Amino acid sequence: SWSSSDSVISVDSAGGAVEPGSPYRVVLLGASGVGKTAFANIFAGGADSMDSDDCELCGDEVSDREIEVDGETATIILLDTWDAEKSDEWTQERFMQIGDAYLLLYSITDRASFLRASELRITLRRFRPARHTPIILVGNKCDLVRCREVSTSEARACAAVFDCKFIETSAAMQHNVWEAFYGIVRQLRLRRDSKED
Ligand code: GDP
């Protein structure tokens, strides 16, 4: 298997691990309690957890695995150490820079987390002015229908303004979580293919 230190070298400063077959770094962003760990656990299910010594950026909350999307294999490195409340500024900035793509999570039951996602989107734009960094706004906990504080239509409108895709998920029910990862891979491929043209 490839080593994470090699992949650090092969990623260019514009944030592109864009060669076919090279791993994509996907970063989970979002307020505390929205379900980032639950997402990471579903993703890592059955996959090797990377040795934390291999990763200069983060602790042990990193996993990588190959997934097949539309008949083609993609390798995703998922980074989940980012924490808006606990991380220092340097770490936050680093995470804003190293991702090839971002899953921007909020909880549909927590309006404050939705507002936090908006702030994060704006911060991300500052670090990643390029329009084509794939970002998906993810409304998690959609199983908790009776506690909903953010409507689907409002979030969809917000995603349109933010120029990103939108999906509602339930990590608890394992609903749409893989679809979010597939969506990220599809967007990364679109970007890759448009660069090849
Ligand atoms: P993090 O702080 O963003 O990493 O959030 P966690 O993954 O630790 O989740 C916070 C809490 O929400 C935990 O108690 C999870 O079990 C719960 N949780 C996460 N995703 C869902 C979901 O889709 N539905 C429900 N009902 N609970 C969830």
Image (cartoon, rainbow, N blue to C red):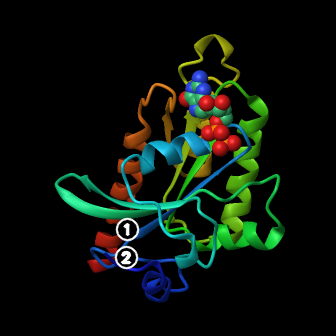
The image quadrant that residue 10 belongs to is bottom left
Question: Camera-side residue: 92 or 173?
Answer: 173
Question: Camera-side residue: 142 or 151?
Answer: 142
Image location of residue 150, percent across then percent down = 67, 25
Q: Which quadrant of the frame does ligand 1 lie within? A: top right
Image location of residue 175, percent across then percent down = 42, 29
From this view, report whether residue 26 is shown above or below residue 105.
Answer: below
Residue displayed at 51% across by 33% down: 171
From this view, report whether residue 91 is shown above or below residue 148.
Answer: below
Q: Is residue 88 visible?
A: yes
Q: Residue furthest bottom?
A: 9
Circle 2 sits on which residue?
18
Question: Camera-side residue: 5 or 100?
Answer: 5
Q: Residue furthest left?
A: 71
Where disc 2 sits, the SS reads: loop
Residue displayed at 57% across by 70% down: 52
Q: Is residue 160 left or right of residue 196?
A: right
N-terminal-most mark, 2 or 1: 2
Mark 2 → mark 1, Cα distance in angstroms: 8 Å
> Nearer the observer, disc 2 or disc 1?
2
From this view, report whether residue 156 is shown above or below residue 153.
Answer: below
Q: Is residue 141 visible?
A: no
Residue displayed at 43% across by 31% down: 174
Q: Looking at the image, do the residues carrying marks 2 and 1 touch, with CB atoms under 8 Å apart?
A: yes
Residue type at numbered disc 2: Val
The image quadrant that residue 94 belongs to is bottom right
Image location of residue 41, percent across then percent down = 50, 45
Residue displayed at 53% across by 81% down: 14
Where disc 1 sits, the SS reads: helix
Circle 1 sits on which residue?
191
